[in-house]
Amino acid sequence: MDIAEQTTASQSDASSIRPAKLAHVVMRTNERFEEMVRWYLHVLNAQCVHKDDNLAFLTYDGEHHRVAIARVPEMVDRPSGTVGVDHVAFTFAALDHLLLTYERLAEDGIEPILSINHGATTSIYYEDPDRNRIELQVDNFVDFDAFAQFLESGAMKRNPIGVAFDPAAKLKAMRDGTPAADLQRYDEDQLDPAIMGVLAAN
């Protein structure tokens, strides 16, 4: 929807106006500014479009910035168990993109804190140098209708947590020829309550 269309909509029915997209995330940091910038550039395979002593704009697509990192020297580290944003998720186009990214990061010593099939997504979680969590994921369903059918099956009611997996094993299986659809299938019977402990530990 362009500006003219939004103006028309606002004149007729303001209740129908919604954001066009989620644009970016801003991270506040302290003396780990340079480390944070390097980490996000590497993890997201991003480029830096602006950087000065206290602010960096990073992007990985046509958006002018997807992640901004701001240095605020007086900031203190966040204690565990704090209310706030839990994590930010980035979606990849296909399972092989996600797993190859996992491999690239693992080769550089960046290991996930959790890898889990949530039903809707196959996801790998990481913590940045400030312990903010990000989720790298791929959608398990081709469209919303397929996801709706999954919800109607009751699978998420029976296992709302998800199923942990070994990304290295999944990558090997992919290279051995296992179809992505099989690797992304949700096995609701593998309920592991310990996963919730990892998700809630930050």
Image (spheres, helix red, strand yellow):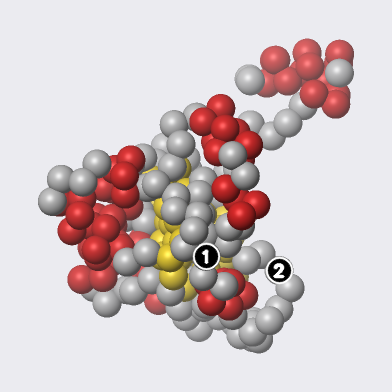
The residue that mark 1 highlights is 191
Residue 91 vertical position relative to residue 12 in the rendered view, above or below:
below
- The quadrant in which residue 82 appears is bottom right
Question: Is the residue 168 above or below the residue 23 in the image?
Answer: below
Q: Amino acid at mark 2?
A: Gly
Residue 172: % across, % down: 18, 58
Position in image of residue 144 (x %, y %): 56, 31
Mark 2 and mark 1 lie on one chain; the one further toward the N terminus is 2
Direction left: furthest residue: 176
Q: Nearer the viewer, mark 2 or mark 1?
A: 1
Looking at the image, residue 119 sits to the left or right of residue 176; the answer is: right
Residue 131 location in percent, x, y?
52, 77
Q: Residues within 10 Å of mark 2 (few under 14, many from 20)?
A: few
Identify the residue at horizontal 85%, vertical 24% (top origin): 14
Q: Secondary structure at mark 2?
A: loop
Q: Residue drawn 80% across and 24% down?
A: 16
Q: Say above or below: 74 vs 90.
A: below
Judging by the rendered image, the residue that carries numbered circle 2 is 84
